[in-house]
Amino acid sequence: MRFLRPALFPLLMAATLAAQTPAPDLKQNPAAARAPLNPALPTLFVAGDSTAARGRGETQQGWAVPFADYFDLAKVNVANRARGGRSSRTFITEGLWAQLLTDLKAGDIVLIQFGHNDASPVNEDDSVPVAARRARGSIPGLGEETRAVDNIITKKAEVVHTFGWYLRKMIADTKAKGATPIVLSLTIRSVWKDGKVERGTRHSRWSAEVARAAGVAFFDLSNAMADAFDALGEAQTKALYPQDHTHFGAVGADLHAARVVAGLKAMPASPIAGVLSPQGTAVAAAP
């Protein structure tokens, strides 16, 4: 699928919908995310949340699932390590980041995308029903402030940092391995006002600021997809989000994946040059 300029996006969308086949079983499978990697090949990792992770049904699929179709897997591993429900904080505290680092080697690339779940509470109390507890948020902002909590979910003492601190740690850890970190802003929610889709949240802006300060590449997926969805229109965009306003289905996932490929192709000294499949080669580079 070729990702074209926004003016042609509705035509592309119509063709994609017409060709859509029933979605496969998308139940989240952590073991699949840990599939063996070919050690002789570079690896492109994705670290993120449910908007990138393998979904839980036909109505939810993360963009990093179809993302692999855009690459020649004889030349590069594509490892989707995103996990639903995680913030930058819990991706680290639950050991998911440490698992990724175990497999990371010099020459690899890590796409880092967090923020949706970082807006959750830092901690909660017993007044919140157990099933509704979401003590996974990071402290808003980019500073070095901390907050000590007795985590109501893990029942452990924890020092919570800012969103910027967690992103900086991921960037620094990636560089220390001789690998390349690339920061992405968030996927877009299908929330509309006056005929325009919601643009990136403050976590998208903070992601850009952290990447700029660290001197690493940044791709603004939020505004790229917002431009495309504004051109597509509210009704057709909402059809891509069959479950809720945050999680898209298979077609929406593929559109996001293609747009990430387009953005990576447009970067100076593109990090994905020479490892694309015919499907990836057909995507037009677009900042």
Image: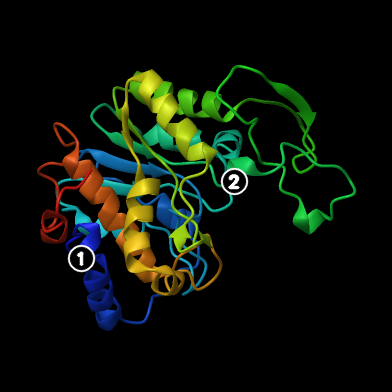
Mark 2 belongs to which amino acid? Answer: Asn
Image coords of residue 166 (percent x, y)? 53, 28
Instruction: Look at the image and tell me in which quarter the C terminus lies.
Output: top left
Provide the residue designation for mark 2: 117
The residue depicted at 54 percent of the width and 53 percent of the height is 84
101 sits left or right of 85 in the view = left
Above or below: residue 287 compared with residue 182? below
Question: Would you call the spot at circle 1 few (<14 residues within 10 Å), some (14-19), or many (20 or more)?
Answer: few
Provide the residue designation for mark 1: 8
Above or below: residue 93 compared with residue 286? above
Above or below: residue 102 compared with residue 71? above
Q: Nearer the viewer, residue 130 or 59?
A: 59
Q: Nearer the viewer, residue 21 or 251?
A: 251
Mark 1 belongs to which amino acid? Answer: Leu
Image coords of residue 109 (percent x, y)? 29, 35
Q: Nearer the viewer, residue 31 or 28?
A: 28
Q: Quadrant of residue 129?
A: bottom right
